[in-house]
Every structure is written in C-alpha cells, then in structure tokens.
Image: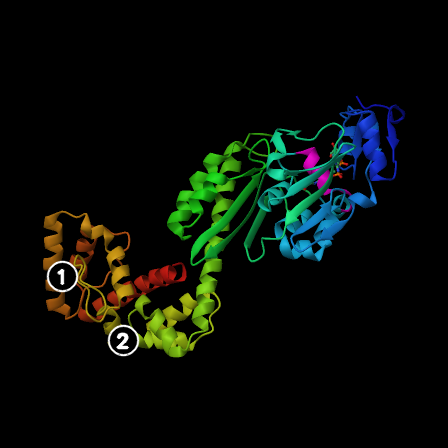
C-alpha cells in the first residue's frame, strides 16, 4: 500500500559535506536521492521502505566532469545527458556514451544519473557493462574520508555492493587507455527506446599483427550482476579471429552466463542472443582487421599489390587488373571486382591459374606456385590425408586419366571435401565435353579464389 507523502521527510542540505555529515550522524537512516528515477518508481509502487530522503540533485561537487592526461572523472550525479554530450567521453569511451543514449527516453536521460544506475544495481542496467569494460574505479566518500575501489569488485551479488550505510559514490574514474580499440555494444529489448534490456553486450578489442589483443567482453541481464566473460576473452586472446574461432566462442560465451526466465524473456532466448551478440562483435573485429589489410594493400605500388594478391588466384592478369582497381576499401567491393575480372579473363589466363595447383591427393606443388599458394593448397586438401590407401590410388589414377582427356590438372574446390567426395566429382566431370569441363573448372577456381581472399584478409 502506498504511504502518505506526509510520512516522508526530504531534505536538501545543498553541499556534499553537509550530506556526508548527515549520513554519518544517522548511518542507514537517510536514503540518498539523485535523479529519483528509480526511487520514485519504488515510491509509486508503495515499495519505498526509507522514510528519510536526502537529495543529491545538483550538488556541484557531484555534477562535474574532470579530464586529466590519464583519466576522466565523472561526478556520480552527472546525468545521462551530461555523459553523452561530453565530447571526451563520446570519443574515448563510446560504449558509455552509447549506453547513456539508450537509457530510457530523453526525460529520463535528463534526470537519471550514473551513480544512481550503479547503486540501483539492476542486472539489466545499461551503463554497467561499459564500466566493467573500461576498468572504471569508484571514489566513495563518507565523513571518514574517501576510498577508491575498482568497479569490478563493487557489486558482489544481486543488489549487494561494497557501500557502507554512511557512504556515497562521489565519482566514477575511467582510465584514458582505450583509444584505437574496436568498440561494439548492443542492447536487445522489446523495442529500441524505453525498454529494459533482455540482454546487453559491450565489448572492445584490438587486432595486433592480425591477432586479437586485449579483448574485453561484458554482458548485462544474463546473471545476478553485469559480468565480464573472462573465459571467453581468454579463448579469443592472441588468436586469429576467423569463422572457426567464432564457432568455438559462441558456446563458450553461453556457458559463462546464468540467465533466468522472467517477465521480459526466457533464459534460453537470452543465452542464444548472447551467443549471437558475442559472435557479431568478433565478426566486426575480424572485418576491422580485413580493412587494415586492404588499407595496407591499397598503399602498395601496382606491381607489389599484384604480386601480393596473386597467390589467391594464380592468374597474373587477374592480379594486375584487380590491383589497378584500387583503392578498394571494403571486403564486398574486393569480392565483386574479383568475380567480375575472373569471368572476363581469356582461356589462357584461366589455364595459368589452374597450372598453380597440385594434383588432388598429391603434395608436390608445381614450380610456378608461390610458397603461399602451396601452403593454402596443403590446407585445402586436408581431407585427402585421412583417406584409405585404395582411395588415394584411385584418385591418382583418375587424375592421370583426367589429364590425358583434357590436357590440364583437375580443379575442384577441395575445402571441406573428403577424398571419396572428390573422387566421385572427378569421375562425374570426366563425362563432360571439353568446353563444359573448362567452365566447371573455372567456377571451381572462382570458389577457391574467394576462400583464399578471405584467408588473405584475415591472416
Ligand atoms: C521510464 C524509465 C526508463 C528507464 N530506462 C532505463 C534503461 O533503459 N536502462 C537503465 O539502465 N535504467 C533505466 N531506468 C532506471 C533509472 O533511470 C537508472 O537506473 C538511473 O540511472 C537511476 O539514477 P537516478 O539518479 O535517478 O537514481 P535514484 O532513483 O535517485 O537512486 C537510485 C538508487 O541509487 C542511490 N544513489 C543515487 N546516487 C547515489 C550516490 N551518488 N551514492 C550512493 N547512492 C546513490 C539511491 O539511494 C537509490 O538507492 C529507467 C527508469 C525509468 C523511470
């Protein structure tokens, strides 16, 4: 049942020191109210146990944002509007600025504060994953003085935290060491605005020499408190981010969270979405790596650029024409240009590309093939090594027969195929007339080129 407003006492001492001494005189008796966007919801629902309220609203000491060379210090009573409009935060801590921009509507952003979000301690709170990612530290103040605690250790269980009854959060400090990171954040709710998250993920990472570095992933609404996915981070750290890794990461991320069924969603849905969001982050990280490779390639001389990309296809004309189309800034543009050029080449250019491949089942690569092409061929033909001796012999015989018929090596996109599958394809294709078979080989070469371009972009 809702209490009568006259049952409540609200004071506004007007300075931080006055509030702190009030809390010291009667610890646990006074409930601080900043923007009131959580407290007033509790009041309206008749669930506000505290009767004595002390206002933190507009205390100048809690409303400042200070910037030094090493950190940004955000007063705990800064609102979401203060946070998202502050250029240094938007540039250096985009995950926090994004969370501020989708926390409730504009009215809520003008009133709700960062300190209130932390102490309200909802597992679905939007700003908290960003604070985990950016290694935030909290300055807590009381009449006894100040102490600084890492935010990671502040929440210790559902709505439980290391805040004494006479303490306030004075400020949130963010170290300025995350520039140049790829950032990712997604909030999945019933709708884009004014919805509480079913799942939210904030993540950052870098690619250094093609491998993932300092990957940090945090999630909300999937455990009693927002959490870092540390095992998942370790799995990714130091690795090339490719499809294989992303497939392994998805279940690893899901196994780290403990979502529940509630009014907003189900545990199963939350787990599935979390896996998808973490995978999406890694795809973006990989794409950023690909654009770095492209940027470097765009800067090469035409000869160097053609030489570097040649092993993906094997045709010198294809490599020359593709490098002449630079700058190519996006993966998609590279793939379409490659396909288009390939389809327009002369038969002699196609033959040149075919001639760089070893026979299926043979490790010996032609002299014309580059060492990179040889390495890729060996991986592409992984499936053959495990085949029975009889299958390998049958493949060798079929290869010889194919070459006698068509006068060139048999080309098939070997990735993911067993020796038996390739033997069947080889035998079927020997039924083709020369022109049909030449086209079939060219299409297989096109698939090989696309797979190799992907590997080249994500080394
Ligand atoms: C319509 C609406 C939409 C919302 N949408 C979202 C959303 O999308 N995402 C989201 O995360 N939240 C959302 N919220 C929740 C709320 O707006 C946030 O949690 C907000 O940050 C709370 O801040 P406040 O200043 O209003 O907190 P208050 O209500 O003033 O206080 C909340 C708690 O924090 C304590 N407190 C506040 N400041 C301090 C301090 N400096 N030191 C110690 N204790 C302190 C108070 O004692 C109280 O226990 C929404 C709320 C509403 C009403």
Residue 115 on the magenta segment: yes
Residue 65 % position (x, y): 74, 50
* Residue closer to the observer: 175 or 441: 175
Secondary structure at numbered mark 1: helix
Secondary structure at numbered mark 2: helix
* Image disc number at residue 399: 1
Residue 329 % position (x, y): 49, 68
Query: At x 42% / y 74%, what residue is drawn?
Result: 300
Residue 402 is drawn in which quadrant? bottom left
Whether the residue carrying mark 2 lies under 8 Å from ligand 1 is answered with no
Residue 412 on the magenta segment: no
Taking 109 as reference, is 357 above or below it?
A: below
Determine the main secondary structure of the stretch shown in magenta: helix
Report the magenta residues as a range: 110-121
Q: How many marks?
A: 2
Q: Specify the quadrant that holds the C terminus.
A: bottom left
Q: CA distance from mark 2 to mark 1?
A: 22 Å
Where is mark 2, residue-wise? 349
Q: Earlier in the sequence, mark 2 or mark 1?
A: 2
Query: At x 10% / y 54%, what residue is drawn?
Result: 393
């Amino acid at each position: 049942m809702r209490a009568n407003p006259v049952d409540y006492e609200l004071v506004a001492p007007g300075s931080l020191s006055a509030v702190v001494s009030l809390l010291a005189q009667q610890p646990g008796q006074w409930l601080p109210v900043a923007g009131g966007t959580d407290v007033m919801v509790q009041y309206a629902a008749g669930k506000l146990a505290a009767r004595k309220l002390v206002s933190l609203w507009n205390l100048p000491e809690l409303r400042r944002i200070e910037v030094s060379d090493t950190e940004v210090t955000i007063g705990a009573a800064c609102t979401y509007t203060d946070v998202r409009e502050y250029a240094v935060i938007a540039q250096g801590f985009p995950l926090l600025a994004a969370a501020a921009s989708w926390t409730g509507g504009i009215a809520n952003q003008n009133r709700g504060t960062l300190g209130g979000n932390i102490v309200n301690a909802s597992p679905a709170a939007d700003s908290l994953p960003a604070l985990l990612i950016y290694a935030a530290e909290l300055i807590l103040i009381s009449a006894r003085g100040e102490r600084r605690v890492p935010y990671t250790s502040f929440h210790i269980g559902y709505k439980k935290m290391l805040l004494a009854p006479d303490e306030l959060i004075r400020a949130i400090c963010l170290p300025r060491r995350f520039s140049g990171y790829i950032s990712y954040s997604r909030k999945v709710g019933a709708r884009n605005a004014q919805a509480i998250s079913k799942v939210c993920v904030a993540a950052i990472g870098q690619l250094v020499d093609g491998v993932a570095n300092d990957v940090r992933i945090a999630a909300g609404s999937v455990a009693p408190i927002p959490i870092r996915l540390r095992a998942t981070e370790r799995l990714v750290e130091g690795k090339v981010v490719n499809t294989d890794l992303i497939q392994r990461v998805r279940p690893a991320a899901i196994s780290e969270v403990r979502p529940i069924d509630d009014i907003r969603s189900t545990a199963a849905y939350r787990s599935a979405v979390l896996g998808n969001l973490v995978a999406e982050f890694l795809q973006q990280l990989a794409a950023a790596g690909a654009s770095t490779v492209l940027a470097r390639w765009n800067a090469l001389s035409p000869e160097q650029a053609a030489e570097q990309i040649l092993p993906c296809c094997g045709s010198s004309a294809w490599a020359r024409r593709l490098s002449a189309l630079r700058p190519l800034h996006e993966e998609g543009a590279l793939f379409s240009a490659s396909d288009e050029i390939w389809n327009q080449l002369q038969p002699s250019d196609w033959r040149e590309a075919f001639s760089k491949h070893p026979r299926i089942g043979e490790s010996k690569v032609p002299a014309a093939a580059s060492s990179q092409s040889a390495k890729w061929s060996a991986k592409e033909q992984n499936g053959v090594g495990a085949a029975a001796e009889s299958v390998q012999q049958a493949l060798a015989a079929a290869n010889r027969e194919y070459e006698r018929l068509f006068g060139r090596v048999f080309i098939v996109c070997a990735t993911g195929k067993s020796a038996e599958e390739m033997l069947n394809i080889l035998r079927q294709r020997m039924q083709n007339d020369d022109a049909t078979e030449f086209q079939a080989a060219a299409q297989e070469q096109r698939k090989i080129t696309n797979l190799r371009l992907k590997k080249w972009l994500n080394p």
